[in-house]
Image (cartoon, rainbow, N blue to C red):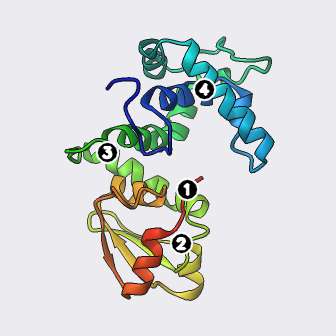
Amino acid sequence: MPPDSPTLCGDWTAAQLAAHIVLRERSIVEMSGRIPVPALQRRAERALEDFARRHPYEHLVDAVDAGPSWHDRVGLVPVAWAWSVPAVREQANLLEYLVHHEDVRRARAGWTARELPEYVQRSVWKRLPGLIRLTMRGAPVGVALYSPEHGEVRTGRAKRDGVAVTVSGAPLELALFAFGRQSVAQIDYDGPAPDIAALEKARMGI
């Protein structure tokens, strides 16, 4: 994939998305950009753009593939040591890596869905309850996510007020939906048309 390829992450190119993944595991500045403070977010964005400019795309891709080691550091505060622990990386990064992989694949015309191994789909499903508590807390209606092979999970609003819309699909597709990729997630809706329309336009994600 060329470095200037579009992604589903706003204006980020493939190179900037790769830089984000690398910095996410190595830089306290990038981590602080997740805090809803505009100054910190602007600082993190500048750091990302500078990092993407200074490092060849091939090196960024190799760094994503290799993952961090305990001695990696970008900036004054070391954080990579925690991400270098295999159990931590697997627990924290499965959804991050899968979704960002699709952010690059599905931003291009003619994409087709991948057939993931069942054990990967099961792992995604196990993470959905925790994911939707974070990413779908602002959903405008109560939502149930349903997968025929795995069952159903409900948002907090659905548990409190009842299910208005059921969204069905494979676990990865449901994760894409929950991360705000409604336009590319291969899912089916069941519910009143106005509620579905509101959900399709809702902003979801971290």
Disc 4 packing (10 Å; few <14; some 14–19; many ≥20):
some
User: Residue 205's mark?
Assistant: 1
Which residue shows up at 69% across the image and 15% down it?
73
Q: Is residue 134 above or below residue 123?
A: below
- Circles 4 and 2: CB distance less than 8 Å? no
Report if the CB atoms under discs 4 and 3 are less than 8 Å apart: no
How far apart marks 1 and 2 lie (CA) works out to: 14 Å
Q: Which callout, 4 or 2, points to the residue nearer the camera?
A: 4
Marks 2 and 3, how far apart at CA: 26 Å
Tag 4 secondary structure: helix
Left or right: 143, with 148 as reference point: right
Front in this rendered view, residue 64 or 200:
200
52 vs 175, left or right, is right
Residue at disc 1, secondary structure = loop
Residue at (61%, 31%) from the top-left corner? 24
Which residue bears the numbered disc 3? 106
Residue identifier under label 2 = 155
Q: Earlier in the sequence, mark 2 or mark 3?
A: 3
Residue annotated with mark 4: 49
Q: Position of residue 49 (x, y in %)?
A: 60, 26
- Give the mark nearer the N terminus: 4 vs 2: 4
Residue 138: name its quadrant. Answer: bottom right
Q: Which circle, 4 or 3, is nearer the viewer?
A: 4
Q: Is residue 68 above or below residue 133?
A: above
Amino acid at the residue labelled 3? Arg
Q: Position of residue 46 (x, y in %)?
A: 68, 29
First in sequence: mark 1 or mark 2? 2
- Report the residue at 26% width, 47% height from top: 118
Element at label 3: loop
Identify which amino acid the numbered label 4 is placed on: Glu
Q: Amino acid at mark 2?
A: Thr
